[in-house]
Amino acid sequence: MQSAIQGLKRSTSVKTLVIGGLILILLIPVSMIKGVVHDRDSIHQQARHDIMRSWGNEQLIAGPVLIVPFTLRHFNSNGGEIIEESRLYLLPESLNFDTRVNPEIRYRGLHKVPIYSAAISIDGEFNSPNIELLGIETARIHWDKASVAIFVSDARAIAETPVIDINDKARKFEAGGQQFFGDMPPPIIAPIGALIDSASAEQTVHFSMTLHVNGSDSLRFTPLGDTTRVSMSSDWSSPSFLGNYLPKSRQITGDGFTADWQIASLGRALPWQWTDRLRPVAQAHQSAFGVNFYLPVSLYQLTLRATKYAVLFIGLSFVAYFLFEVMANLRLHPLQYLLVGFSNAIFYLLLLSLAEHIGFGWAYLVSASASAGLIAGYSAAVLSGRKRGLMMALILAGLYSFLYMTLKAESYALLAGAIGLWITLALVMYLTRRIDFYAQANSVAND
C-alpha cells in the first residue's frame, strides 16, 4: 500500500494532471487582475469624458448654408388665397477650408487625453438659385431676410464669436436655436439680409470667415460644396484619417502632418438647393471625413493584451520545472509550482501599477526583471543549483522579450503570437523527444 502511494506521488501522469489543475487554479488570480485592468480603464474613460465635456467634444463642421425666406401663394378648394411662409436652402458652389490644428495633451490625475484648438479659414461662393426649377416667384423671395448657417456639433466650444464677410461686408453669428434639416445639429446663424439686395437672385455671393473652435479626439468636415477642398496642418505626429474620403495628398513626419482633400458633390448626400416642402431626408453626416488625433494603444489595452499570454507564461514555467524533475530526478511539491505561478501572475499587476506612473516601456522592463529575478532566485534553491536557476531566468527573459515585441507589433501581433507559440511548442517537443515517461514510472515502481 505504501509503495502504491509512493508510486502515485512519483507518477508522471499524476504529476501532469496536478500541474494542469494548478494552471486552472492560477487562472483565478489572472482573471482578477484583468478585472483590475478593466476598472482602471473605466476610470481613464471617465477622466477622458470629463475633460472632453469641459473643453469640447469631437467636432463636426458643416456649412455654410444660405437660407432665404420666401412666400408661397396657392388657393384652397373654395378659391380662397393661402399665403405660406417657407425657406429656400442653397449649398455653396465652391467651399474651401484651410485648417490649422494645435493639439495638446491634458491630464486628469494619471490620465491623459488629446485635445486641440483649431483655426479654420472658410471661403467660397453661392450661385444664384434655379427659381424656375423650384417653382418660386422671384418677387416673393425675401432676400432682405436672408441668413447664413454654420453647423458645429459642439457649438459651446467655439472660442470666439465668428464673423462672416459677405461681398466684403461683415456680420456676426448668433445662436440659431433650431434644427433645420437632416441630422445636422442646431446651427449658428448670421443674418445677412442687409448685406445683399434683391438682385442677388442673379448674382454670385462670395463669403469668407474664420472659425476658432476647441475639440478633442477628432475633427471632421461635411462636404457641402459642389467642390469642397480641405487643407489641414498640425503638430500631431500620429493622425488617423477617417470618414468616407481619404486625403488626396498627405505627409506625416515626426513633427506633424499636412493633408489635403478635394471632393466633388457626386458623393454628397444633399442636393444643391431645396425648400422646406422638399426637405431632404438624407443623413448628411454619413459623407463626413477628417482626422482622428490618434494616441498609440493605451497602457490599459497593452496590459490587457499581455494578460492573454498569462497561461503561456505559467504553463511554460511549469513545463520547465516538470522537465527538471524528470531529467534531474528531483521531487517538487505542488506548492512550489503554485508559488512560481503566482510570481508570474503578479508580473501583470506590477506592470499595470508602474505603467500609470513611469510609462509602459519602463514599467515592463522593471516588472519583467522583478518577476524573472524572483523566480530565478527561488529556482536556484528548489532546483538545487544556480545553473538551473540561471536557465529559468534565461527562459523567462526570452518569454518576456517575445511578449514585449508581440505587444508592440500592433499590425502583426496575431501573427507574431502564433509563430511564437509554434516555436515554443516545437522546442518543448524537441527537448522531450527522447524521454521515456513510462520508464520513469516503472523505475519508481521498482524502487
Image: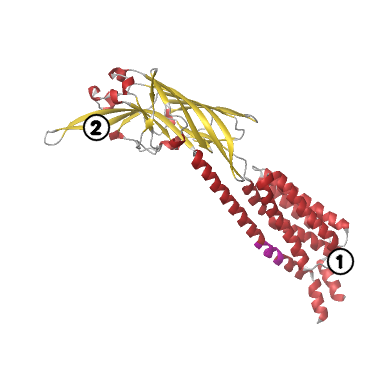
Residue found at the far bottom of this picture: 1
Is any atom of residue 435 visible in this view? no
Amino acid carrying label 1: it is Asn
Q: Judging from the image, what secondary structure is the residue with disc 1 in?
A: loop
Is residue 101 found inside the magenta-colored segment of the image? Answer: no
Foreground mark, 2 or 1, reads 2
Can you tell which mark lies on residue 329? Answer: 1
Residue 26 to residue 10: above or below: above
- Left-right relation of 398 to 102: right
Three-letter residue code for mark 2: Glu
Give above or below for 278 relative to 444.
above
| Foreground residue among 248 and 308 | 308
Residue stretch in magenta:
21-28
- How far across and down, in percent of the image, does residue 156 sit? 44, 36
State whether residue 175 is above or below residue 393. above
What residue did someone put label 2 on?
Answer: 85
Q: Is residue 112 left or right of residue 342?
A: left
CA gap between label 2 and label 1 equals 97 Å
Q: On the rendered image, what quadrant is the N terminus found in?
A: bottom right
Say which quarter of the image contains residue 226: top left
* Residue at 81% from the left image edge and 69% from the top image edge: 438
